[in-house]
């Protein structure tokens, strides 16, 4: 009782992915996180859909599972802990766990929202020598620079590939896409140096035409990344450590709203004026 926690994605714990320490790729992930409708909640009037992302937590009390309930201790503000369970672990983990750049390498992040800006912070933690954030929104580019991007680029009207090749001195070692835009995926691949790798993180891209000859000829690697390859009971405490040491200034991403202002928070998320809106429940 009284333990402070954050909730994150659920996983079964028994499938080959979970046993191999890759719960983000749990074979039951879709059922456990996206379908809802678990039998934890019931009402005489009919079915209650719940358990989205293993929790459905827009409420004063939430039913969750041991595997997706992570103790966070007393050292972090609840509003800053909240996004650790999804966008922050996705961005930071996409860099530290999935791409794992060596110190000094060049990394480009496409899209400077909550996930992309977390990736920028991850790249800084990893000691990347060149960190480029690409985003059409000036205020997001400015925040990216504040969080550790060595260069920022407005893609509108720019020759993105040429500029990135120039900035990185011949192509990036790593790229991480959060936009899910096919044209951006193509640019991201073209901006990699031979043997570079692209992490696809953005959701919702339709099928994209991939430059197969380029991927083959340059020995590029393309991989999807879910939730930053996180093992939440290990990685979320690691993220809190970075925050405590000032390396993950979550306060620069988060805007809080009273729960009653749900509509305002939603609008701010949709129009991009808030990077990471967090709802606070009544005391
Ligand atoms: N793979 C996962 O496990 C996982 C987890 C969480 C979120 N996501 C997904 O990651 C994506 C990013 O999430 P977010 O919260 O940061 O979203 P967001 O909308 O805040 O950020 C996307 C950014 O892309 C920018 N953008 C638009 N067009 C661009 C272009 N042509 N070039 C470069 N940037 C461009 C936008 O201005 C915006 O800042 C979403 O698709 C989300 O669903 C994936």
Image (cartoon, rainbow, N blue to C red):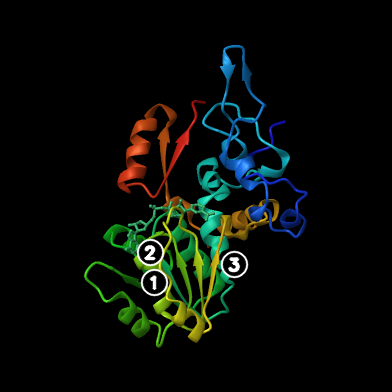
Q: Position of residue 64 (x, y in %)?
A: 66, 35
Residue designated by label 2: 182
Residue designated by label 1: 186
Mark positioned earlier in the residue sequence (3 or 1) = 3
Q: Position of residue 63 (x, y in %)?
A: 65, 30
Name which residue lies at 28% across and 68% down.
155
Tell me if 204 is positioned left or right of 135 in this view.
right
* Distance Cα–Cα, label 3 vs label 1: 20 Å
* Nearer to us in this view, 97 or 74: 97
Q: Residue furthest top?
A: 44
Ligand 1, image quadrant it occupies: bottom left
Number of the front mark, 3 or 1 = 1
* Distance Cα–Cα, label 2 vs label 3: 21 Å
Contact between marks 2 and 1 (CB within 8 A): the answer is yes
Residue 210 in sight here: yes
Give me the disc on residue 98. 3
* Up/down of 116 relative to 102, above or below: above
Q: Quadrant of residue 44?
A: top right
Q: Callout 1 environment at 10 Å: few (<14), some (14 to 19), or many (20+)?
A: some
- Is ligand 1 less than 8 Å from the beta carbon at label 3? no
* Up/down of 12 relative to 98, above or below: above
Residue 129 in sight here: no
């Amino acid at each position: 009782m009284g333990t402070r926690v954050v909730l994150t994605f659920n996983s079964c714990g028994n499938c080959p992915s979970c046993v191999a320490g890759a719960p983000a790729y749990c074979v039951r992930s879709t059922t456990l996180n996206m379908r809802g409708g678990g039998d934890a909640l019931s009402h005489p009037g009919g079915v209650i859909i719940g358990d989205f992302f293993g929790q459905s937590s827009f409420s004063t009390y939430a039913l969750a599972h041991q595997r997706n309930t992570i103790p966070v201790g007393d050292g972090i503000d609840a509003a800053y802990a909240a996004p650790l369970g999804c966008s922050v672990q996705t961005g930071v983990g996409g860099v530290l766990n999935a791409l794992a750049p060596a110190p000094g390498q060049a990394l480009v992040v496409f899209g400077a929202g909550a996930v992309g800006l977390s990736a920028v912070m991850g790249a800084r933690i990893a000691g990347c020598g060149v960190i480029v954030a690409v985003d059409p929104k000036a205020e997001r580019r400015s925040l990216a620079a504040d969080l550790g991007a060595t260069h920022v680029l407005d893609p509108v009207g720019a020759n993105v590939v040429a500029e990135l090749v120039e900035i990185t001195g011949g192509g990036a070692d790593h790229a991480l896409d959060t936009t899910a835009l096919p044209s951006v995926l193509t640019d991201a691949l073209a901006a990699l140096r031979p043997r570079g790798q692209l992490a696809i993180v953005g959701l919702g891209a339709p099928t994209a035409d991939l430059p197969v000859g380029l991927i083959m000829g340059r020995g590029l690697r393309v991989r999807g990344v879910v939730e930053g390859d996180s093992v939440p009971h290990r990685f979320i405490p690691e993220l809190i450590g970075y925050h405590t040491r000032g390396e993950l200034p979550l306060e620069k991403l988060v805007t809080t709203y009273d729960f009653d202002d749900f509509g305002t928070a939603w609008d701010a998320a949709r129009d991009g004026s808030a990077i990471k809106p967090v709802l606070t429940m009544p005391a």
